[in-house]
Amino acid sequence: MTATQSDLAGLSRYIFTAPRWYSSLGFALIIAAMTGIAAFDSGTGSPTVRNLLILGRDAWQGIFFIGLPTVIASFGTTGVDRFVGGKLTPNRSSLLALLCELILVAIVTGAGVIAQVTPLGQTFVYDALVVALASVFAFRLLVVMAVSQSSLLIAAVPASLQTAVSAVFLFIYSGTVRFFELGGPLLDAYLTPYLSRASEAPPELWVIGPNHFQLLAVTCLIYAAAVYVFIRVIDRPWQRSLGVSVLDFIGGFIGHVAEGSRELEDFFEKLGEEAVVPVTVLAFRRPDGTQKARFVLPMIHPGPMGEIGGGNFPVRVAKHTDGLVFPPHATAGHDFNLVTEREVDTILDAVDAAQDRLTYDAAATRSTRTESGEATMLGQAFGDDALLVATYAPGFADDVEYGVGLSVTAEARTTGLDDVLLIDAHNSNDGLEGDDLGHVTPGSERAFDMLTTARQAGRRLAERPAGPIRLGVAWDRTEWDAIDGIGPLGVRVAVVEVDGQHTAYILVDGNNMVPGLRGRVVESVTADEPIDVAEIMTTDTHIVNTVEADNQVGAAIDHGAFVELIERLVSEAVDDLGPVEAGLATERTTVTVFGNDRTETLASHANAVVSMGGAFAVAIILTAMAASLLVFVLT
């Protein structure tokens, strides 16, 4: 992961779950009632029954004039938006209405405070009310256009609902109709009673007149134009570089973080490119033919976030196969994120195909560890094939590029190995700070270190005698979850015994590991008999990244308890040792991934929207407000 990609991963801090529609509305009504008590203060004084009734009346007025438009907008927006081809859900619609109510209350309350300490007076408050209602319309317009992918004119219909309902209420209960001649005594007698209810409204509303509604209409037009300019300016780089709209990304992101929808996958699918990826399986079976454990390694990256794309691949493959499944991290970066979860099915089909091609062998070599520069490689041969685990610990490293992994595999095979399962242990990193996040790229010193270790490991394995294999496994879901940096697969251990040597392969369902923890685990496990060699790996699951972008193993859990758990599991795996046969095979398959450089381009554009978009939005808002102020002065 590059620094730019880490910033994109950092968008996970915005992830939340949209509350149910009734929760949003309940909170909106409470806020409206409290605002009514503050805005329509009737001077209740001591808590007598009469004064409590007056307090209740003030609260009801707040609910009626502020909360009721929110409720109508909440229910009505979904229906109107769906009618014009949109896709706002009730939960999103209610949350949007609540946020707009908060915007309205904040602006009017701020204006009220200013009016109390300055000579601007009550007129300023009603001018601010006009700005607040126009701001609500603009905010809703932006969200509806993003979520429903509607044009400006079509999105304006559901977006205007909350502002329009509030304006109708103000028109009726301020008595504004008295400024108009409606067409004679007969029409006045039947229509005016319904359009003029000033006697039933707080006196504070009587100041509102026709000019306020004229200003509201003009201000809404100005703000709509500002929204259009804002969208077109920030959308232009996306259209030119990626051929997609920023609204696709924003809408998909909102759908994912608010309701867990798959809309973001639809966006990624538009960006995707086809790629051929190897899918390697190393299976261990008992003498009776049943499968005891299986290592599954497709050369993809389990991202980009949460359960989007291949983010939940480790769990999917664990549910798909028999025996205890180990899905470690492959040598692939974010360019090889699957665009949709559907692509996982293609990978699983390749796993089944590789399983069918397995040829089992009852012999393996003792494991060996080689080093070159910063790279360390743990290797063990099973028949004519080999399992290689690479790490840069105690140094810091993140993803190993796809091209580097292919080269390393090819280098190992030059020593006589038939096939290789190459794992990126992904077990030591110092987070997402800084420009260099330890990405292992082609042509780097680290890439050549890895090539050298693979060649050395292959040569040593070719020289070592083979012996019968005994395998023991154990796993624990653990008491920790994604918040603690541990995914649903917990911790899994496989101990391989060959010719009296015990090698422990430890897999944690997490995304990388805090510095030093890997060394502590390896040292602790190998300190006691019978383990001679050990390595700890992570799956790089991105389920844990819905909490924080760098929610690494060890960042939120007690290291002592973690080491004790692994020691117990290793002991259980040793007790489980039994004779097995091993078979390794690789199947190639075609999947749709983000594609070369697409991740970097997407990340840079998304980060620009977050960083520069905010500043540009402020500039647009200030320009729109300046135009509004000019209109206010001239009318």
Image: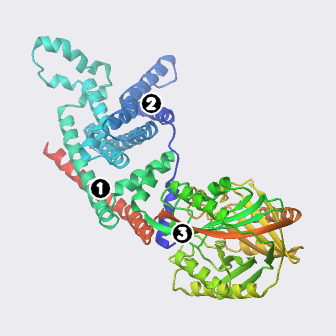
Few, some or many residues within 10 Å of mark 3 (<14, 14–19, 20+): many
Q: Are marks 1 and 2 in contact (CB under 8 Å)?
A: no
**Camera-nearest label, 1 or 3:** 3
- Spatial distance from mark 1 to mark 2, Cα to Cα? 35 Å
Find disc 2 in the rendering and name its residue.
33
Q: Quadrant of the C terminus?
A: top left
Q: Is residue 565 above or below residue 434?
A: above
Of marks 1 and 3, which one's residue comes earlier in the chain?
Answer: 1
User: Real-space Cα distance between discs 2 and 3?
Assistant: 59 Å
Image point (49%, 50%), residue name: 257
- Comparing marks 2 and 3, which lies closer to the viewer? 3
At x 26%, y 57%, the residue is: 232
Question: In the image, is residue 140 above or below residue 1?
Answer: above
Q: Is residue 260 above or below residue 386?
A: above
Q: Amino acid at mark 3?
A: Val
**Local crowd size for mark 2, using a 10 Å CA cut-off: few (<14), some (14–19), many (≥20):** many
For discs 1 and 2, the disc positioned in front in the rendered view:
1
Look at label 2 and name its amino acid.
Answer: Ala
User: In this view of the protein, which residue sits in the foreground, 177 or 561?
Assistant: 561
- Say if 594 sits above or below 103 in the image: below
Q: Is residue 574 visible?
A: yes
Q: Which circle marks residue 277 in the picture?
A: 3
Tell me if 59 is positioned left or right of 238 in this view: right
The three-letter code of the residue at mark 1 reads Ile
Of 507 and 436, which appears nearest the observer? 507
| Rendered image: mark on residue 505 | none
- Residue 450: where, in percent of width, then height? 62, 84
What percent of the width, then of the height, locates residue 157? 27, 38
Q: Which residue is mark 1?
A: 231
Question: Circle 1 — which element?
Answer: helix
